Image (cartoon, rainbow, N blue to C red):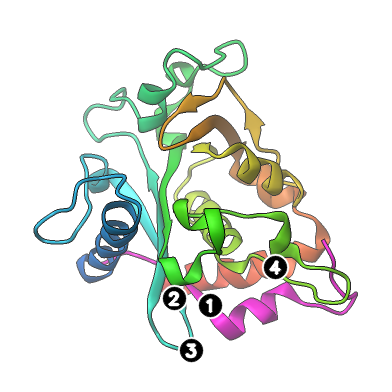
Amino acid sequence: MFFPAVFNLGKAFKQYFEIVPALSDALRDHVYRIRHQVYCEELAFEPQRPDRRERDEYDTHSLHLLIRDVRSGEFIGCTRIVRARPGDPYYSMPFEKFCAATLDRTIVDPARLPRDTMAEVSRLAVIAQFRKRGNDEKSPLSISDKDFGTSEQPRFPYIPVGLYLGTIELARLNGIDTLFVLTEPRLANHFRKFGVNMQTIGGAVEHRGQRIPSMMTTHGTIDNLWAIFRPLYRTIAADVAQQR
C-alpha cells in the first residue's frame, strides 16, 4: 500500500462517498433494489423477483447500511448485519447453516456466545459500474492488489472498506461485539493488512464460489486499525452517528 505521508483517507472519502444507515422503509427499499440489481440481475445468484427487490427471512431482524456516491447522489452499494431473531435467539444465522460441517468449534462455538452481542455481516453488494474490471465483476464486492496502486499512482478501495468500517461502527453502536462473515479468502487477507484481526474459524465452503468463515470483534477492529486508516474510520463513524 502506497500513501503520501500527508494523505488523509477520511478527507478523500468525504469528497466522493457517504455512509448512510438504512433506518427508514424508504432507505431499506434502496437496499433491496441494489441487492436485486447485483445478486439477481448482474450475478444471477438469486432468482429475479417481480418487484425487483431481493429480500429474505433475515431482513426483518437485520441492520442495513448504504453507501452513496456524493457526486450523483445515487446509492451504489449496501450491506447488512444479521442479528439474533427476536423471540427465537437460537435461530441459525446464515453462516451457521452454510458452515455447519466446517466450523472449528475449538476456536469458537457460536451456540455458546451471548446471541444479543453477536451478528453476521452479509449481503454486501456494489453495483456493476463501481466494481472492478475483469473477473471482479463476477463478485458482489472485492478488493485486489491493484486497488492500492503504486508509489507513483496511489489508490485506495474506498467503497468496500467504507462499507466494512460503516458496518463495524453500526454494530458497535448497537451493542454488537462479535461479527461473523463468510467471505472470499483474498478479501479476508486484504483486511488483515489494515490491522483488522479477521480470524478464520473453519474450513472453506462452496457458496457462490469458495468462501471461508471468519470472525472479528468491533472493539478489536477499531482499536487495532493502523494510524493511516483512523481518519477514514472517524469520517465514517461521523456519517453513521449523524444519521442515527
Query: Can residue 20 be seen?
Result: no
Would you name the residue on which mark 4 appears?
156
| Cβ–Cβ under 8 Å for marks 1 and 2 | yes
Pinpoint residue 207: horizontal percent, then vertical percent. 41, 32
Mark 4 and mark 2: Cα distance apart in space = 17 Å
**Screen quadrant of the C terminus:** bottom left
Q: Which mark is residue 68?
A: 2
Q: Marks 4 and 2: which is nearer the front?
A: 4
Taking the magenta stretch, the answer to whether it contains residue 238 is no
Q: Residues within 10 Å of mark 3 (few under 14, many from 20)?
A: few
Earlier-in-chain disc, 4 versus 1: 1
Mark 3, residue position: 71
Dot 4 or dot 3, earlier in sequence: 3
Magenta highlight range: 1-24
Q: Position of residue 176 (x, y in %)?
A: 48, 42
Residue 100 drawn above or below residue 42:
above
Sequence-earlier tag: 4 or 2: 2
- Residue 7 inside the magenta-drawn segment: yes
Q: Are marks 1 and 3 in contact (CB under 8 Å)?
A: no
Residue type at mark 2: give it. Arg
Q: Amino acid at mark 3?
A: Arg
Measured as percent of width and height from the top left, residue 92 is found at 32, 25
- Label 1 sits on residue: 17
Per the image, label 3 sits on a secondary structure element best described as loop
In what element is the residue under mark 2?
strand
In screen coordinates, is 148 left or right of 96? Answer: right
Q: CA distance from mark 1 to mark 3?
A: 8 Å
For the residues carrying marks 4 and 1, which lies nearer the camera in this image?
Answer: 4
